[in-house]
Image (tube, rainbow, N blue to C red):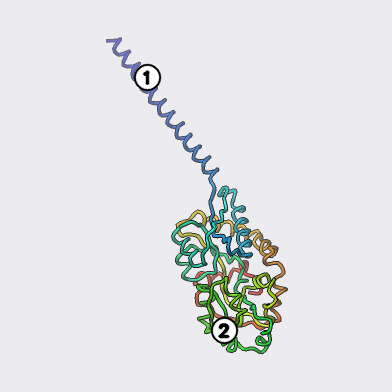
Amino acid sequence: MEENNFAIVIGSTLNTFLFQLEGLLLVRFLIFVLLVSFSQACLAQDLVRYVHSKKHSDFKDKYFIDLLTLILETTKTEFGDYKLQPVAIEMAQERTSKMLEKNEYIDLTWRMTTKDLEQRLQAIYVPLLKGLVGYRIFIIRSENQSLFHNNMTLEKLKTLPVGQGYNWPDSKILKANDFNLVLGYRINLMNMLQKKRFDYFPRALYEPWLEIEHNDELVVEKNIALKYFAPMYFFVNKINKRLALRLNKGFTKLLNSGGFDQFFNRHELISGVLSKVDLGQRKIFELPNPLISDHTQKLLIDKRLWIAEF
């Protein structure tokens, strides 16, 4: 009997020891899994793909890519590394937006905002160009400067044929304001202007100088400007919560530190533009923009987001 009781005690003790050992091994295994997962997370990269046309490259793209890089660098400590990947697809703005909406091939785009676009995609609600894109000056044929004199009225300007791109928000804004629109594809608009299909081509303040740099027939008009509220945003797919969070946090840090102002004022696309355009000497016609959402309209109260002239 005593031998049996001893065996029972030994067996029970052994079972307890094995159970405890099994539990310890399980804990160690779970710790190992967590450490591996954490290490993988630290090594993971946020892939950010965007459209980059090789056939019709746009000099303005460098500004947006540089700003995106700055935002991702600013959030590197919290979110880890990243990889920017240009995708060589030739397509218009609207098709790019549809591709992003379907979560195909790209992760981000930059566009002038509209109510429709904000419903379809997730906007990052910081105007990338601080409202500068809402000012428009004109490319015209050199012999036509006399048409755009200081005493010109908005009514007269609306009667002159104006060139714009298919599916551009600008086209919808001008159409809503009863301008005489002539539509074309972006790559053809300069040629259409030279062939007298229309009389003027409105461009953002930083655009026309380089666009006509090697064209002796076209000039930047000297007396008139349009102004409408039309910020540009980064847009991502609505399910891409991580990228949206990273971009928002990065922008917040840059706004609070003054880093966004420094980037904007020093970038080669913007530096010196306002003095070159000389808005104070121009007659400015302000137009309502029916495409603006209530959310975007409310951003006007945050003065950090806009240039002083806006």
Is 44 situated left or right of 205 in this image? left
The correct choice, above or below, for 251 with respect to 208 in the image is above
Which residue is outermost to the front? 195
Judging depth in this view, the residue of 264 and 55 nearest the camera is 55
Residue 131's x, y, as percent?
61, 71
Determine the residue positioned at 62% across, 89% down.
Answer: 153
Determine the residue positioned at 42% across, 25% down.
Answer: 21
Q: Residues within 10 Å of mark 2 (few under 14, many from 20)?
A: some
The mark nearer the N terminus, 1 or 2, is 1
Q: Residues within 10 Å of mark 1 (few under 14, many from 20)?
A: few
Q: Amino acid at mark 2?
A: Pro
Which residue is outermost to the left? 1
The correct choice, above or below, for 250 with respect to 210 in the image is above
Q: Amino acid at mark 1?
A: Leu
Judging depth in this view, the residue of 306 and 147 nearest the camera is 147
Q: Nearer the viewer, mark 1 or mark 2?
A: 2
The correct choice, above or below, for 199 with respect to 79 in the image is below
Secondary structure at badge 1 equals: helix
Q: Are marks 1 and 2 in contact (CB under 8 Å)?
A: no
Residue 265's x, y, as percent?
69, 65
How many labels sit on residues?
A: 2
Question: What distance separates the C-alpha of mark 1 from that of mark 2?
Answer: 95 Å
Q: Quadrant of the N terminus?
A: top left
Residue 264: quadrant of the picture: bottom right
Q: Which residue is mark 2?
A: 161
Q: Which residue is mark 1?
A: 14
Judging depth in this view, the residue of 270 and 264 nearest the camera is 270
